Image: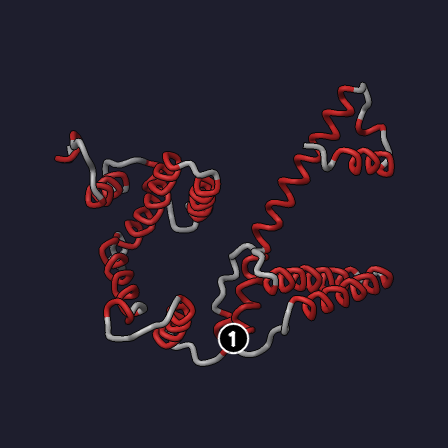
Amino acid sequence: MLDFLENKYYTINNLVKIMQKLRGENGCPWDKEQTHKSIRNNFIEEVYEAVEAIDTDNTQLLREELGDVLLQVVFHCQIEFEKDSFCFDDVVNELCQKLIIRHPHVFGDVSVNGTDEVLTNWENIKNTTKGTTSYTQTLKNVPIVLPALMRAEKIGKRAGKAGMDFKDYSSALKCLKSEIDELEQAVASGNVSDINDELGDLIFSCVNVARKLDVNAEEALAKSSDKFISRFEKIENYLELNGIDMKSLSIDELDVYWQKLKDVT
């Protein structure tokens, strides 16, 4: 039995040892069976739950969810430790080194004038330490597994640093309108592959417009989705109170109710 079972307050060292126990010879069968890939989605879910706690200003929930995220970090570290690859301390060490290197204005003698210079220095140091030698590499370094809108925004920003960007939102909006025309042409042709390509281009253009307007496309779409659910609920509740089956109405009839109720608080 571990010495810290009756601790009144546990530390990160205790957490690492608990994970070692769970994955050890007399540990938990489920924990022992897990691999990086088998708990991959758990990691993603825990991060999103932490984000939800942030968005809802729920401090108590945030504390809990951050713990769940940390558990995933320790879990993955333990899997590698068992392979004699690296341990949690190695991860912390590398992180500390990175923070020190990328903040020469705090830990060194570099002077900066505001946040913009800090971000510029961060990006330059990052590219140097990672051996990035071309703008194309910076685009390829954006993780493929990011949500598509978030990835598109990052790619657009990095392309902009190479000078390939719209001058302002109006020029981005002009491109968006052009993409709509191209999508309509693809639909008219009936070519499924072209439709898929042009629809992707259209969405990418929407992200560019959002970026030039300093709007986070991912957050904007999330809010629109919530707005749609809210308006849909108003229509359904209204129809139910009036004894009308929603499915019995045509889309044109439903649109009348939509326009009538969408601005009702």
> Image point 52% across, 57% down: which residue?
146
Compared to 263, does 165 lie above or below? Answer: below
Compared to 222, does 240 lie above or below? Answer: above
Compared to 198, does 50 lie above or below? Answer: above
Farthest residue toward the bottom?
Answer: 133
Residue behind mark 1? 161
Q: Nearer the viewer, residue 50 or 21?
A: 50
Q: How is the image coloured?
A: secondary structure
Q: Nearer the viewer, residue 29 or 113?
A: 113
Q: Amino acid at mark 1?
A: Lys
Q: Position of residue 132 (x, y in %)?
A: 42, 77
The answer, for residue 38, to whether it is visible in the render is no
> Image point 82% across, 61% down: which residue?
184
**Image side of residue 154 versus residue 187, left or right:** left
Rendered image quadrant of residue 101: bottom left
Q: Position of residue 203 (x, y in %)?
A: 67, 59
The answer, for residue 49, to whether it is visible in the render is yes
Compared to 220, does 93 lie above or below? Answer: below
